[in-house]
Amino acid sequence: MIDIRHVSKAYLSSTRETWAIGDVSFSVAKGEFVSVVGPSGCGKSTLLNMMGSFMAPSAGTIEIGGRAVRHGTIPDKLGYIFQKDTVLPWYTVGRNIALGLKFRGLPERDIRETVGRLLGLANLAGCEDMLPHQLSGGMRQRVALLMTLACEPEVLLLDEPFGALDSNTKMTLHRELLEIWQKLGQTVVMVTHDLDEAVTLSDRVIVLSAPPSRVVLDHRVDLPRPRDVFALRDSDDFGQNVRAIWAVLGREFQAAQARAKGAENVA
């Protein structure tokens, strides 16, 4: 479903050229859940933005559904969840979820049925007339997810969607996201700084190196589904997966810190 081949990205200033992404290649199968982790500055969100067509790579190609991604042209059937929720504060929960469906010109009866089904899927039934300021942070993030799911994307790009939430709320949303994903079957790529989160949710975890980044590990998470996100973290298998990834990711964090200190000394 997603094919990334020798993608790189450089940022230009008046004095220098900085390569955030050096040479990144990997593929994601249809219906697969893949997380991307790596040290700060390695281009995780940049890679996601290029997949969404928000910026162009400096080199390399990205294909989604067999079609090349072109800068400024959002791929068909693609949904994007940002770090900060995009819920409109002056609309009710129901009107927020219905927004994309109205733009598509669906009949009101179909819109009501879809909104009701999605609210039930995310345990928000009865909240359709509430305003965003009346919701908790976790509930707002669920509404943002439903706004995207309402348009029936086949590919979901998630950019740190749970980063600002407390641990208990985050794990509750992990459970709900897995339940929704298992029912709807989208192809998911998620960027996260939370290694436990990546292992809990994913089929595979891609580790990027310190910048200019490359793929240094493509780890298959060997944990059965469906997963109980609360019980899972007490299992030996979960710990083994985390340790296997951290053995590589930890080295990349150290390399990034050493490089940053070296740059400070030169300055």
Image (cartoon, rainbow, N blue to C red):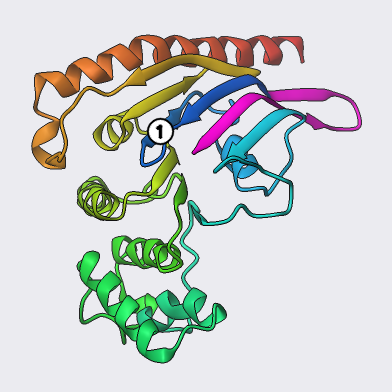
Q: Which quadrant would the C terminus be assigned to in this image?
A: top right
Query: What secondary structure do most residues of the magenta stretch adopt?
Result: strand
Q: Residue at x 30, y 60 (%)?
A: 138
Q: Residue at x 77, y 30 (%)?
A: 58
Tell me, yes or no, if residue 210 can be seen here.
no
Is residue 120 depicted above or below 30 in this figure? below
Residue 218 located left or right of residue 234: right
Please provide percent x and percent y for residue 23: 65, 18
Q: Is residue 134 magenta?
A: no
Please provide percent x and percent y for residue 222: 22, 22
Q: Is residue 11 magenta?
A: yes
Tell me, yes or no, if residue 4 can be seen here.
yes
Q: Which residue is mark 1?
A: 35
Q: Provide the secondary structure element on which disc 1 rests.
A: strand
Q: Most extreme residue toward the front, as rendered? A: 66
Residue 55 located left or right of residue 3: right
Please provide percent x and percent y for residue 227: 15, 39
Residue 139 located left or right of residue 108: left
Kind of residue at badge 1: Ser
Identify which residue, 114 or 234, lies in the foreground.
114
Displayed quadrant of residue 107: bottom left
Please provide percent x and percent y for residue 93: 36, 79
Q: Which residues are magenta?
A: 1-20
Q: Residue at x 72, y 46 (%)?
A: 70
Q: Residue at x 43, y 40 (%)?
A: 190
